[in-house]
Image (cartoon, rainbow, N blue to C red):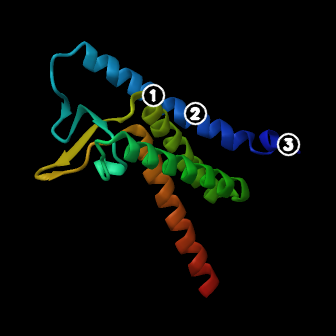
Amino acid sequence: MSFFKKNIYSLSLIFFLFLADRISKYLILNLFKTSDEPNIVINSFLKFELIWNNGIAFGLLSFEENFYYNVLTAIIVLITIFLIFLMIKAVNVEKFGFCLIIGGSFGNIFDRLSYSSVIDFIDFNIGNFHWFIFNVADIFITIGVFILIMFELLKKNEKKN
């Protein structure tokens, strides 16, 4: 059986996640093109604020020099390729977790290659607690990582019993 036939559901999910991220970023870019406001308040704990992140998660490892940015981008691409191989071997919930991470990663890689930055815009805070600004792809990646961690913990717990 060919790779594509065997992984059609996983590839479809990855494409859907990538598309959802692209649509959200397209909409937010158009929203900010037509708005003079620096941010758009949704409610007391959620607003949209457009930032261009040239680092990794939450703006860490931001570089001004293109060389370091390109090296970081290459590392992210290599990690994503490695995750694709892990996804191919995985089954069920574990495969789903990898798909979430890969779909989100593709969204952010697309930004890196197209804009030399990742589009972040979701600004979440509760009272004085203010989270980093993130995007839809980051949500998919975070949920995927959480699923894989829980899967490993449950698998380890089953081996003990």
Query: Which quarter of the rendering shows the C terminus?
Result: bottom right
Res 60 visible: yes
Residue lying at the far top in this picture: please name it: 34
Q: Earlier in the sequence, mark 2 or mark 1?
A: 2
Would residue 87 be found to the left or right of residue 125 on screen? right
Write the residue at 45% across / 48% down. 71
Query: Which quarter of the rendering shows the N terminus?
Result: top right
Write the residue at 64% across / 54% down. 95
Name the image quarter holding residue 155.
bottom right
Write the residue at 44% across / 41% down. 137
Q: Earlier in the sequence, mark 2 or mark 3?
A: 3
Q: Earlier in the sequence, mark 1 or mark 3?
A: 3
Would residue 42 be found to the left or right of residue 54 on screen? left
Q: Which mark, residue 44?
A: none
Residues at marks 2 and 3 touching, judged by CB atoms closer than 8 Å: no
Name the residue type under label 2. Answer: Phe
Q: Nearer the viewer, residue 11 or 80?
A: 80
Q: Residue 20, position in %: x, y?
A: 49, 31
Q: Residue 67, position in %: x, y?
A: 40, 44
Would residue 11 be found to the left or right of residue 19 on screen? right
Pointer 2: what residue?
16
Q: Nearer the viewer, mark 2 or mark 3?
A: 3
Pointer 3: what residue?
2
Pointer 1: what residue?
114
Name the residue type under label 1. Answer: Ser
